[in-house]
Image (tube, rainbow, N blue to C red):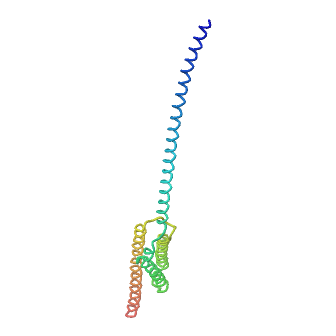
Amino acid sequence: MRAVSAVFLLLLAAVCQGQVETKIEQILKLQVYIAELEKGYAIAQKGLKVIGDIKAAHLSLDQDFFARLEAVNPAIKGFTKVSDILVMRDEIVAECQDAVKIAATSGDYTANEQLYIRKVTTSLQDGCTDLVGQLNKVLSSGTLKMSDDERLRDIDVCYEAMKERYEFVFAFAKELRFQSLLRKREKQGLGTLELLR
């Protein structure tokens, strides 16, 4: 029986020895796997940091770009059409005031005609005020995000709109003066005709 026990113990020792070697082998493989995993994790960490840095740099570039869009180039403020718009506005206002004055003091226009003339000139002046307000927005830093080309395009639009009002008000005032002169001559003609009777 001792022999059987010895054989059993030897077999058990051999089996245990094989299991121990297998466990040691598995532990070594797990350590290699953990080392590779740690390397992969470090690479992923570095990659995420690079991506974060790139995003931050891109965001900074975008913020700089949009900040530049808010700032107005000084050359645009000195654009000749800007001063032309303001000069036309002043002349339109003066001509509107003259038109209302002519209509009111000449005695050649009815109350309804005078009201119409005031409405037309008020509308012109309000339009000019709106255009100058739009121009101020285009020329003020921090109000609109626009490129220089977009600002120049908007100034051109304001200029053309002001020019149309300018041409209209002078044609309108010229017609008022002409009508006033015709009405005066008509009154004089009728007075002369009555004298002749």
Q: Is residue 12 above or below residue 195?
A: above
Q: Is residue 140 above or below residue 19?
A: below
Q: What percent of the width, then of the height, locates residue 7?
A: 57, 11
Q: What percent of the width, then of the height, locates residue 126?
A: 49, 73
Q: Is residue 157 above or below residue 55?
A: below
Q: Residue at x 60, y 11 (%)?
A: 6
Which sits in the foreground, 164 or 115?
A: 164
Which sits in the foreground, 102 or 145?
A: 145
Q: Quadrant of residue 73?
A: bottom left
Q: What percent of the width, then of the height, locates residue 174?
A: 39, 82
Picture quarter with the N terminus: top right
Picture quarter with the C terminus: bottom left
Which sits in the foreground, 120 or 163?
A: 163
Q: Is residue 55 left or right of residue 1?
A: left
Q: Report the number of discs.
A: 0
Which residue occupies the extreme bottom position in the image? 195
Q: Is residue 190 above or below residue 76?
A: below
Which sits in the foreground, 182 or 157?
A: 157
Q: Quadrant of residue 181?
A: bottom left
Q: Is residue 18 left or right of residue 186?
A: right
Q: What percent of the width, then of the height, locates residue 121?
A: 47, 77
